[in-house]
Amino acid sequence: MPFDAVSEALLKGGIAPRHVRRYVRELEDHLEDLMAQQCAAGYDGEDAARHARARLGGDIELAAAMLEQPGMRSWPARLPWLVFLLLPPILTIAIGLLFYAAFYFVGNDAAKINAVVHVPQDWLIGVSVTAMTAINVLAVPFMAVLLAVLAGRQRLKSLWPLLGIALLLLATPMFGYKFGDHHNGNLSANYGLVIPARWNTLVRFWPLMLSHVLALLPAAWLALRRKDSA
Amino acid sequence: MAEDLSTFATGIPELMLLRLLHDREMYGYEIVQAIALKSGQVVTPGEGVVYPLLHGLEKSGALKSRRKTVNGRSRVYYRLTARGEGRLTTLTDRWSMLNGAVEAVLGSGAHAV
């Protein structure tokens, strides 16, 4: 692609990907117009392309013009501590609570739902329990992948997302539940560091352990990427 | 005011863009051709650098853009907003003042020294 170098320079300079995409697309349109003009002026293929590209400006000039513009930098480039450290735990808890509220309602009110739509009560409770366990396992890895993708897409250094994932692992949100007649209305949420002291603790908290293992995969990718770019 | 005028040179491309878009909506290539034509080929920047300026003006609210297909070609057209009109008036006034000041200095020649 004719503007790959410009695109890379802008992403590394912290320009938001959407601005980069738009700029490159407009440059491509402009280049096409210039090529047509050069061809109309009598230049053939390669000459027309060379003249058109020269008139458009060099890669350094094109990148510098965009980097000078205020307000084009992405949030992760401007405020990495906010995007990688503060928002992920808040978002993880918010997303977890949202799904939990929904599935807790389904599981806890299975009898009422069953009376209206004739879906077996056991099945509703089973689905809720499975979904809520899945959220416990997947919420943090999902957020870790998101941070890694964000850093990769915007060519950001790996340090901030690695710190963000470490923070998520240290303070993982875990939600608990109890359905049925004897435990009606019991929903608990814990947020904090869980250190398994014994083997049976490890087994008991298997969703947390699995969650940590999965979250370490994007962290490993980020660490390798950091090593490669060093 | 003196400080404003000393840094005004960097606002000249902005003034030209706003003035051209004051008449009608245009796309990037069209703007660059118009600048070259109207300035008698005196002002011929690297043509691609016009886009960051357009994006910056759009972000500040001076311009609005829309993608439009004309004769089978899809392009981003820019037009001036009310805020852009205000910015154009300000820049035009400053330019007139600066131009007048420079003319006065040039006109006075060596006699004033």
Image (tube, coloured by chain):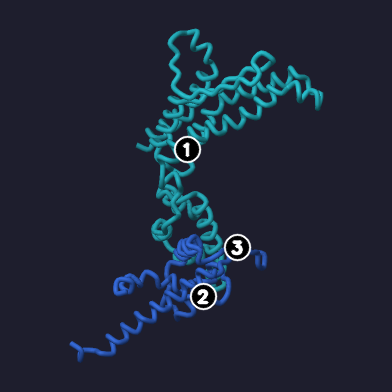
Chain colours: A cyan, B blue
Residue A152 position, x and y percent, is 47, 40
Q: Nearer the viewer, residue A23 or B12?
A: B12
Q: Which residue is mark 2?
A: B20
Q: Nearer the viewer, residue A171 or A34?
A: A171
**Alpha carbon separation for disc pair 1 and 3:** 33 Å
* Residue kind at label 3, given as amino acid type: Arg
Residue B66 image label: 3
Decide: is A98 above or below A41. Answer: above
Proximity of marks 3 and 2: CB atoms separated by less than 8 Å: no
Q: Chain of mark 1?
A: A
A114 with respect to A172 (left or right): right
* Residue kind at label 2, given as amino acid type: Leu
Q: Which residue is mark 1?
A: A87
Residue located at (37% from left, 33% from top)? A227
**Alpha carbon separation for disc pair 3 and 2:** 17 Å
Residue A16 position, x and y percent, is 47, 50
Q: Chain of mark 3?
A: B
What kind of element bears circle 2? Answer: helix
